[in-house]
């Protein structure tokens, strides 16, 4: 039995045990632990990691002494005790992301979180050298969330075989869905940990329809076993999000809506940390019913970002348009919008109290497209998204859209009035002066969202009829009440 005596808050407390190897330990042996601190008790599942090794993982969220006590169908694993002390979180570590103020997010310790995410669906399934290049690109990029698939992907510009498979395979290539491949999952969790070290949330897509290996066509029983195994292995990583499926509606030939509901409910029941849970549509008219209680936030695919206020009203949860189309030049219309258009869509979402997702689909001879395989970022949008993230992180809270004007949003509750953000998009007026409350003094910052500049106007404005504007498209105003 191996373990550490001290564990940082929000890190992994892991108990490693040796147990039976005969039969099929993935299915024949069950293992769990009760994690106890005073009167509080958290139940976590363990898992088999191959070669007679079993592990139980726990993410402590409170400092002080803890004890883990195992329960198992195997006498060799049952009744083992592990005591450790949880010490303060390491600098920069804030815990899992939670929903906050209905439409926004925060970390577990209360720190605000504004998602600026990107998509690299199958980066995990590329050669190791390419994976390392992807991590190096992420190290210098603004993204704090990454959408990625657990299973390999077969789609345009992505036809390679993965270096590792999620399940054991026969010499003829037949999957044994009763036996996960420990080497694959060890590699997956290594990458999740590396993303966490970069401050990036791993938005794990558990199923998808682009699959020549048969994972999307597993039986419901096999789906449940896979889900339980993934949760047991990965839930203790603080930076995990669960995305039940990418384009779930394209799987309905194999999985019914009831099937997806059941998987969602199983996930909500099994995850002791209640990580964020979502699901993603393909057809624009096929949104999942995000009002269902097991969905924590809205993940949507839709280029019509001006609809985001309607999605907020319809679902009453945080909205992330994770696929509002991609910056690139491939023939498919979803993958050839300009960098300026993608940045514009991000600002529209932000100004309406919602969030958007990035992707790059620039064609090259090697067919290494960021959106699928990772590699290097070559577009022009991502530095502007870094600038947007900086602007968002200056806010005193999450934005609430003002219903009469789509470009307006505000944060309420300031001692001198509401903070406001105004985004003009393609409009380019040379002055503006309507919409602010009467008899409130404001200072105005003009923001050029493309040039990434901020200019503070020299005057304080009260009941102003006209405030000078730059007369350029894609400008924004950051409007601060002053005492």
Image (tube, rainbow, N blue to C red):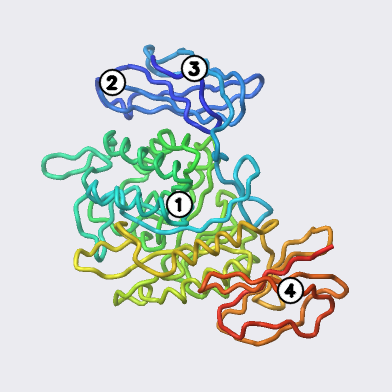
Report if the CB atoms under discs 1 and 4 are less than 8 Å apart: no
Instruction: State the CA–CA distance, disc 2 to disc 3.
Output: 23 Å
Task: Name the residue at the front extreme.
Answer: 458
Of label 4 and label 3, which has the lower sequence position?
3
Q: What residue is drawn where x is 48% and y is 46%?
A: 199
Residue drawn at point x = 57 percent, y = 70 percent: 453
Q: Where is residue 272 in the image (x, y as percent from the top left)?
A: 54, 34
Q: How crowded is mark 1: few (under 14 residues within 10 Å), some or many (20 or more)?
A: many
Vertical side of 390 occupied by 128: above or below: above
Q: Residue 458 carries which label?
A: 4
Residue that numbered label 1 is attached to? 243
Residue 414 relative to residue 242: left or right: right
- Viewer-proximal residue, 239 or 315? 239
Left or right: residue 246 versus residue 471 is: left
The disc, 1 or 2, on the residue closer to the chain's N-terminal end is 2
Quarter of the C terminus within the rendering: bottom right
Q: Which residue is drawn at 51% across and 64% down?
A: 356
Q: Which residue lies furthest to the left in this view?
A: 171
What separation in Å lies between label 4 and label 3 (alpha carbons)?
A: 58 Å
Quadrant occupied by the N terminus: top left
How would you rate the neighbour count of disc 4 (Cα within 10 Å): few for under 14, some for 14-19, many for 20 or more?
A: few
Q: Which of marks 2 and 4 is nearer the N terminus?
A: 2
Q: Position of residue 339 (x, y in %)?
A: 42, 73
CA separation in Å, label 2 and label 4: 70 Å
Which mark is on residue 52?
A: 2
Residue tagged 3: 5
Element class at badge 3: loop
> Considering only order in the chain, which callout, 4 or 1, is on the residue closer to the N terminus?
1
């Amino acid at each position: 039995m191996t373990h550490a005596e001290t564990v940082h808050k929000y890190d992994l407390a892991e108990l490693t045990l040796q147990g039976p190897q005969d039969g099929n330990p993935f299915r024949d042996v069950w293992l769990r632990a009760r994690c106890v601190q005073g009167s509080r008790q958290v139940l976590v599942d363990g898992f088999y990691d191959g070669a007679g090794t079993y592990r139980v993982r726990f993410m402590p969220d409170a400092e002080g002494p803890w004890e883990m006590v195992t329960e198992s169908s195997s006498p060799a694993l049952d009744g083992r005790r592990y005591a450790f002390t949880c010490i303060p979180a390491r600098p920069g570590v804030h815990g899992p992301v939670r929903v906050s103020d209905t439409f926004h997010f925060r970390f577990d310790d209360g720190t605000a979180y504004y998602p600026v995410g990107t998509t690299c669906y199958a980066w995990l399934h590329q050669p190791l050298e390419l994976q390392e290049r992807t991590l190096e690109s992420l190290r210098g990029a603004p993204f704090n969330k990454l959408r990625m698939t657990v299973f390999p992907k077969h789609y345009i510009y992505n036809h390679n075989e993965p270096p590792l498979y999620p399940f054991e395979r026969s010499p003829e290539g037949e999957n044994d869905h009763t036996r996960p491949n420990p080497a694959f999952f060890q590699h997956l969790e290594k990458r999740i940990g590396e993303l966490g070290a970069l401050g990036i949330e791993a938005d794990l897509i558990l199923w998808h329809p682009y699959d020549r290996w048969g994972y999307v066509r597993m039986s419901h029983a096999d789906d449940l076993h896979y889900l339980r195994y993934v949760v047991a292995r990965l839930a203790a990583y603080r930076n995990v999000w669960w995305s039940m499926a990418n384009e779930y509606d394209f799987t309905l030939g194999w999985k019914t809506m009831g099937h997806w509901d059941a998987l969602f409910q199983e996930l909500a029941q099994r995850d002791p940390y209640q990580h964020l849970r979502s699901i993603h549509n393909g057809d624009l008219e096929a949104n999942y019913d995000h009002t269902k209680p097991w969905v924590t936030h809205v993940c949507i695919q839709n280029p019509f970002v001006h609809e985001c206020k309607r999605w907020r009203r319809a679902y009453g949860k945080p909205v992330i348009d994770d696929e509002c189309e991609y910056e690139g030049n491939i023939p498919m219309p979803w993958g050839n919008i300009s960098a300026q258009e993608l940045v514009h869509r991000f600002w529209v979402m932000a100004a309406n109290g919602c969030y958007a997702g990035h992707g790059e689909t620039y064609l090259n001879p090697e067919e290494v497209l960021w959106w699928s395989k990772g590699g290097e970022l070559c577009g022009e949008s991502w530095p502007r998204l870094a600038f947007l993230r900086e602007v968002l992180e200056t806010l005193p809270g999450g934005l609430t859209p003002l219903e009469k004007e789509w470009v307006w949003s505000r944060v309420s509750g300031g001692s001198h009035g509401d903070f406001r953000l105004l985004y003009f998009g393609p409009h380019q007026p040379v002055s503006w002066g309507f919409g602010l409350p009467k008899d409130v003094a404001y200072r105005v910052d003009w923001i050029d969202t493309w040039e990434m500049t901020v200019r503070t106007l020299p005057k304080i404005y009260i009941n102003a009829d006209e405030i000078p504007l730059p007369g350029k498209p894609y400008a924004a105003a950051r409007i601060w009440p002053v005492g």
